[in-house]
Image (cartoon, rainbow, N blue to C red):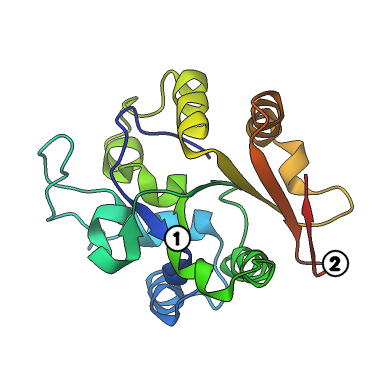
Amino acid sequence: MTCFCRQTLPSQVSLGYLLSLDFEQLATQRTGKENPSFVDMKTGFWLSEDPIGANVFCPRDGRPGCALVDWIAPDDRREQTHFLSWTWKYTLAEVASALKMFQQSMEDPHAASGVFFFMCFFTNNQFRIIVEESSTGSDNLETVFEGNLRRIGRMVAILDTWDRPLYLSRIWTVYEQFVASTLQIQARKGWWGDHCLHKI
């Protein structure tokens, strides 16, 4: 599942928050699973009796129910520096493992604190897309995606395995790679199974 907001958001989720104990505890408590997938989190976060951000007004449409990025602490959101290419079927541990490798690959260890990802799970207002089943944010995907990628200029792509990765079985993630290559976007792919990170 991948969708992109029609409106550009002023801030995105930090690498630090994605690797934090706070996010891990939120995910496990909301899903009741030790290592939930982001599909599992969809139910626990937005389809539960107490959905996250339900009483927070969205700064883009002024209605109750905000995107996850609007709900997290201000220090954990800022203007995006990287686009994250991935799939909601990945587990929390898989995403964390790949992002830790990305963090370790940075020449300046302090630079990680300045990494903020455009990540659809956080960026899009899931109250509109999942709860209300609105088409807002899910139409005109190609144009919006390309515009966001041009603006950000960097992509991190997470692959689940080296042999027959799920990532390459999905049309949209393959399309993301095609567009990134066509636009000559600076991109990286990470394989946590091989414990390596390759620049492409």
Whether residues under marks 2 and 1 lie with C-beta atoms below 8 angstroms apart, the answer is no
Residue 198 placement: quadrant: bottom right
Location of mark 1 (residue): 41
Q: For the point 44% across and 63% down, which residue is it? A: 114
Q: Is residue 50 visible?
A: yes
The total number of labels drawn is 2
Dividing the image into 4 quarters, which one contains the C terminus? top right
- Estimate the x, y position of residue 136 in percent, counting from the top left: 31, 26
Quadrant in which residue 194 is drawn: bottom right
On the rendered structure, is 135 left or right of 37?
left
Residue drawn at 64 percent across, 66 percent down = 106
- Label whose residue precedes the other's in the sequence (2 or 1): 1
Please name the residue shown 42% across and 34% down the image.
Answer: 4
Residue 7 higher or lower than 54, as above or below: above
How far is disc 2 from disc 1 in space, using C-alphas? 26 Å
Amino acid type of the residue that numbered disc 2 sits on in the rendered structure: Asp
| Picture quadrant of residue 63 | top left
Front residue of this view, candidates 145 and 172: 145
In the image, residue 102 lies at what x, y percent?
Answer: 65, 64
The one nearer the camera, 148 or 98, is 148
Task: Kindly state the secondary structure of the residue where label 1 is placed.
Answer: helix
* Residue type of the residue flagged with mark 1: Met
Q: Label 2: which residue?
A: 194
- Answer left or right for 35 relative to 113: right
Q: Position of residue 145 (x, y in %)?
A: 49, 28
**Camera-side residue of 185 and 90:** 185
The 10 Å Cα crowd at callout 2, few under 14, some 14 to 19, many 20 or more, is few
User: 8 left or right of 151?
Assistant: left
Which residue sits at x=66%, y=36%?
A: 173
Is residue 47 visible in the rendered structure shown here? no
Neighbourhood count class around disc 1 (C-alpha, 10 Å): few under 14, some 14–19, many 20 upward: many
Q: Nearer the viewer, mark 2 or mark 1?
A: 2
